[in-house]
Image (tube, rainbow, N blue to C red):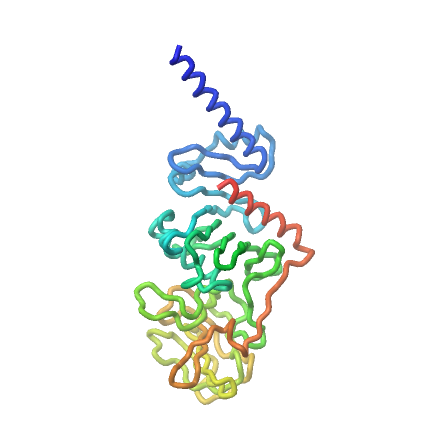
Amino acid sequence: MMLFVLILGVNAGLIAFNISLGQIEAKIGFRADQGTGARKFTYLPVQSSQKVREARISRSPDEESLASTPDTFRLSGGYLEGKEVRTLHLTVQSSLTFSVCRIVSEDQCRGLAVRIARQLSWFLDVDREIRKGDKVALIYQSLPAGPELKILKLDYVSGFLHKTLAMNFFKTAEMNYGSYFDNRGNEMISRLDSRSSPIRNYSEITALPGEHRRGSGTGHAGTDFKAEVGTPVYSSFAGRVTRANWNTKRNGYCIEIDHPDKGVKTLYLHLDRVLVRPGQWVGQGMQIGLSGNTGRSYAPHLHYEIKSRDRKKTVYNPFLFKYHKKYSRTISNRHRKEFDKVIRLYDSLLTAG
């Protein structure tokens, strides 16, 4: 009799679980693939229950191999089509890097922690103002080329700021590259006004002044703009070219310009081509070179540096430097519907993950 009751209890539990899972699938359009470890989810457009059943039967070897990783989703629609992404939820313990590396594999955790910190650095001093107990909810993508990662959605509950920072990656057809916006459609990241920007067409900022590199005892001195080889590079301010192509083993093709009226010098490293010569006077916004991947560079980008003319060689963050004007964009009414749809998708992924 006891055995019969136990079997009935187990069956009832399984029936309740299957009903609950079916309700989730019907509500948000996800297929839950069973396997060892964490479940893998594949995002499905809203479709008939017959198609959902057919999709549930056809599981590929790739899906099975990901069963032991964090929850994984394959997205559809617009620029999200075919992207496979993962979700991450964590509470900060002793440090952000330590907390990420407790969950994410060793080959990705440090790079992911750096990218989270870079996004937060627009609002926080990540060395001093990240608190134990802060919460992170994240959607990220492994890019096809190499070990690079891309954050699509970041929600950060900050104990220091006493609020939640919400950052959503979004791209319209008119944008060469996407950017991060809050839930209301306001761009979270500042941009340099084109009149003083050293580069106007770049996909993202991959390093800021002061960031510490693994194996280096000093912080990064410049701002790195990720851009394709051959992207035009401009003089931020009027000044005289003091030198070009020095220490090329490290700097690659490079330019230094003196700006006495601003009290600084600007440097442009890892260029593909230099279009000016030492002693030449250049005006603000004049093209001086093409971005590249020369010298000690691991991917195409422009290293832009602002340093004081005195012996202290103070390094300035261009987004805090008083002579650089900044602006940010807002999602237009034309793209509001598409933007809201992407936000709902991101939120559904985080809820399901």
Residue 268 in percent (x, y) is at 44, 76
Q: Where residue 81 sits: x, y (%)?
A: 54, 47
Above or below 263: residue 216: above
**In the foreground, 173 or 170:** 170
Please give the name of the residue rendered at 50% of the width and 70% of the height, measured from the top-left corner.
231
Residue 348: image x %, image y %? 55, 43
Which image quarter is the N terminus in? top left
Identity of the residue furthest to the top in this view: 1
Q: Residue at x 34, y 73 (%)?
A: 250
Give the quarter of the image for residue 246: bottom left
- The answer to whether residue 146 is seen in the rendering is no
> Residue lying furthest right in this view?
333
Q: Residue furthest bottom?
A: 279
Q: Is residue 165 left or right of residue 278?
A: right
276 with respect to 191 (left or right): left
Please name whichever residue, 254 or 215, is drawn nearer the observer in this view of the structure.
215
Percent position of residue 328, x then y: 59, 66
Query: How many marks are shown on the rendered structure?
Result: 0
Q: Is residue 8 above or below residue 65?
A: above
**Res 163 seen here:** yes
Q: Picture quarter containing residue 269? A: bottom left
The residue at the point 55 percent across, 82 percent down is: 284
